[in-house]
Amino acid sequence: MTDTDDSFHVFDTTLRDGAQREGINLTVADKLAIARHLDDFGVGFIEGGWPGANPRDTEFFARAREEITFKHAQLVAFGATRRANAKAAEDPQVKALLDSGAPVITLVAKSHDRHVELALRTTLDENLEMVRDTVAHLTSQGRRVFVDCEHFFDGYRANPEYAKSVVRAASDAGADVVILCDTNGGMLPAQIQAVVATVLADTGARLGIHAQDDTGCAVANTLAAVDAGATHVQCTANGYGERVGNANLFPVVAALELKYGKRVLPEGRLREMTRISHAIAEVVNLTPSTHQPYVGVSAFAHKAGLHASAIKVDPDLYQHTDPALVGNSMRMLVSDMAGRASVELKGKELGVDLGGDRELVGRVVDRVKERELKGYTYEAADASFELLLRSEVKGRPLTYFRVESWRAIVEDRPDGSHANEATVKLWAKGERIVATAEGNGPVNALDRALRVALEKIYPQLAKLDLVDYKVRILEGVHGTQSTTRVLISTTDGSGEWQTVGVAENVIAASWQALEDAYTYGLLRAGVTPAE
Amino acid sequence: MTDTDDSFHVFDTTLRDGAQREGINLTVADKLAIARHLDDFGVGFIEGGWPGANPRDTEFFARAREEITFKHAQLVAFGATRRANAKAAEDPQVKALLDSGAPVITLVAKSHDRHVELALRTTLDENLEMVRDTVAHLTSQGRRVFVDCEHFFDGYRANPEYAKSVVRAASDAGADVVILCDTNGGMLPAQIQAVVATVLADTGARLGIHAQDDTGCAVANTLAAVDAGATHVQCTANGYGERVGNANLFPVVAALELKYGKRVLPEGRLREMTRISHAIAEVVNLTPSTHQPYVGVSAFAHKAGLHASAIKVDPDLYQHTDPALVGNSMRMLVSDMAGRASVELKGKELGVDLGGDRELVGRVVDRVKERELKGYTYEAADASFELLLRSEVKGRPLTYFRVESWRAIVEDRPDGSHANEATVKLWAKGERIVATAEGNGPVNALDRALRVALEKIYPQLAKLDLVDYKVRILEGVHGTQSTTRVLISTTDGSGEWQTVGVAENVIAASWQALEDAYTYGLLRAGVTPAE
């Protein structure tokens, strides 16, 4: 159970509201994996879905109970107040919430008068009765109940007395927290702060906030509600959610811990934030946002040459918080804007001593500029940059093998099946090797042919696994006739590195990135270059 | 010249501060194109760069003067206060600002005492003198001067009296606006509001705000400064900028116009916002953020089946503003969460009458679910979805040609050159056609072979142009062995459409998306299907 006290709630709804994001489609296994990450991060509550509303969510609750021992979090089931003119105790949707076994239940209630009339099609009084009856029934069954007041802020504008009466009905019936939801996301912080303060004063209920990001202010809106006295914040990992998204869990928690000095996570968990943000992005199969506050790879990256020289004097003059506190790190970017100071710092970061050799540094800068003009990007391909740097330091490329030629063929047959075949001809340790392999695509066939060719000479390559593959078309107005950039992420189980290839077509660019990926893997494994 | 008055400034710094974003590298032509878009949008000021600091920016100012007739905006040159212990009138950096010919100059000044000492390496008094002298010199030459107080908020925390003395020095010497910059981006709205209010009361200077997004609050911070009396906001298109980025121009302007009811753009320009946001993303060669407030393709997209049925009753219950006001539109997403109501609405949006045929709608929903399980995404491929929908309505696929087989070969030769060749065998209007073509890559070769095969029968295809090509690896933990999804954008000059292909390799997936792209192009051109 949680080791932070109950006076402030960090409530995550990635698995329910976050899953509404365009492009996200979670399996039960995905949901279990995300729940583990969120518990590991230390949130107090994990809203898992709507048991009964769809078989996936029902299965999730059943399996979570069996398979996960939560360290910090309590599992929350989401559902609606009972149907109009019925009894909560007899409503099958309400029963499914109890059947989920979740110790906490969030009920969504209408608090905007027009939604009651047009969407729910019942009377304002019956809606209040639905809230009271459902909350009372669930608490009588030993569950803790939170009530989400949907469309609260729009409802408050239209009919403040009715909106407040829903808050009172929920609180009086036994709901522990009543959450004011900016469901359409149109609010700004000053408005949120004023409404939360008034509702708190007028109702005395414990209040929470649920903000959507349609004005780009969801994080600020959440903090404004806290400023006004809310003690429960509903967020989603990486801000996933419908339309623009929800309040992003990570900057909200970071602001509370680092800027407010408020302890909202168990000791030491904030340092895991960057890792957990990226791990969840991996599960939902979305590329982590490079520019996300605190946790993005760019969040503490410095590009300007102007800054780079001053950062050497005192890094704290140029960062708003120590990146290590959120598990991130400062990065110096290599780019044609950065210049010498950046390359020197980058070399230091990679453990390559440039020893104040001005001519060498100048040569590296020139080489980076020349390659970036062709479309290479070393900002996103540290391993390719390190190979370039080491080549310049040594005065010649790091070479483990020398490729003579390669070929890939993709054939679509009349029966709809495909044949993919690649042949690689290369030299390694004085030996000429020709290898052919099939794959499920041309790049995979090339990857396999390269492994087949090299595996006897370099058995270390067996550990290598390609984990991500990105293709970008440069000068994007010519479709398939443009330059192609490929970024490949490779792992050897203990680390991951990125390499880049640029060519006039996707296969040739992939090949370059593959060559760099294997060369870097051999370098990491401590293998001495062939020459 | 501007047709909004001077009492409130929308100041854009995409070309200067925005260009610091990781991954952005602008040519002079790019900068000119962006300046035209920003002027078209109606901002009052466009900061173009630092003339004299690098040849690209010097050239930009020279060419902008020659080539662009601004409708709304004034061009602004950015530079620094003069060197310590010298005269502004003799400083070559200051001279370059005048030489740029820009009518407005923004000077960056240090306002944090430690930065003066450690980065600038001069005394606090000399820094004040540098501000006074440089502002006075530039105004004496007939230029309007704004002063950016770098690191103002951190400086104010460390030494509020000194920070304010810099504001006073700038204002007294003739600067029209003094901009308080949250350079490290660590502030929250309540802090910004308190500091701006105090500085305004204590100095009487006209104040502006420049916020970075490191806490995820840059938009809210900008609005908080306006609430406290700032009348000049510095922003960048799409929030581009160093680290996490700058305050995003679009949600700031939208909040001011739609939420504050403040006219900050010329009449009618807000409706161009979505188009201009995407056009600028195209120039900087970054994929437009799908989840950007107001202008993202997801910003008014509805996924949940629950909402979809209620939206039919009254769309305004489910959106915080009318998307047409910002040039965007409501979209219903087709996904396995959406169900019947969404498919019906989507059909209506596409002009396909599903006529309340429950069985037909059910068939479409099933087909979408089955395809999405395989990795297709119709959310991002409206044209492929429309083809699927029309096929189900007709009871058979829309067919203009029938492919027998195809083949693509990529060969890397010992001299480093590549050969790419594709052969397509197909039937169209009863004729069997075999065509071979070369290209700069396998997809391009296939595209060309397909055109060669079809061009005599369907001359309409000559107008089609592939404008974007995206590759996504699904189940991203297996590298090149995973399923591949390709999204292609095609234009015929008057419109653009997206198609999707999914297969075990990138070439086969591209082929599917190409087939759909050509089929949809022929449908748009009004060509009757072959059977």
Image (cartoon, coloured by chain):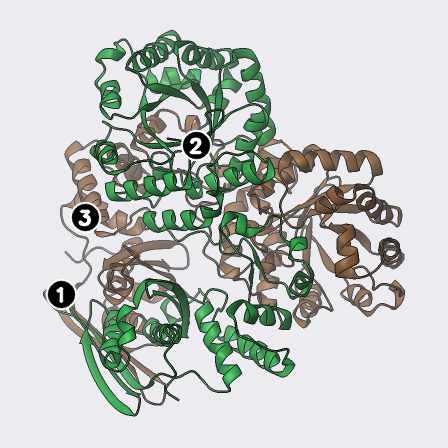
Chain colours: A green, B brown
> Which residue is under mark 2?
A3
Q: Chain of mark 3?
A: B
Identify residue type, mark 1.
Answer: Ser
Question: Closer to us: mark 1 or mark 2?
Answer: 2
Residue A99 lies, with reference to residue B339, above or below; the image says above
Q: Position of residue A353 (x, y in %)?
A: 56, 76
Q: Which residue is mark 1?
A: A417
B142 left or right of B32? right
The secondary structure type at the circle numbered 3 is helix
| Secondary element at tag 2 | loop
Q: Where is residue A219 drawn, in percent x and y?
A: 53, 37
Which amino acid type is marked by label 3? Ser
The amino acid type found where label 2 is placed reads Asp
The answer to whether residue A339 is seen in the rendering is yes
Q: Position of residue A20 (x, y in %)?
A: 35, 37
Check whether the beta carbons of the residues at disc 1 and disc 3 lie within 8 A of each other. Answer: no
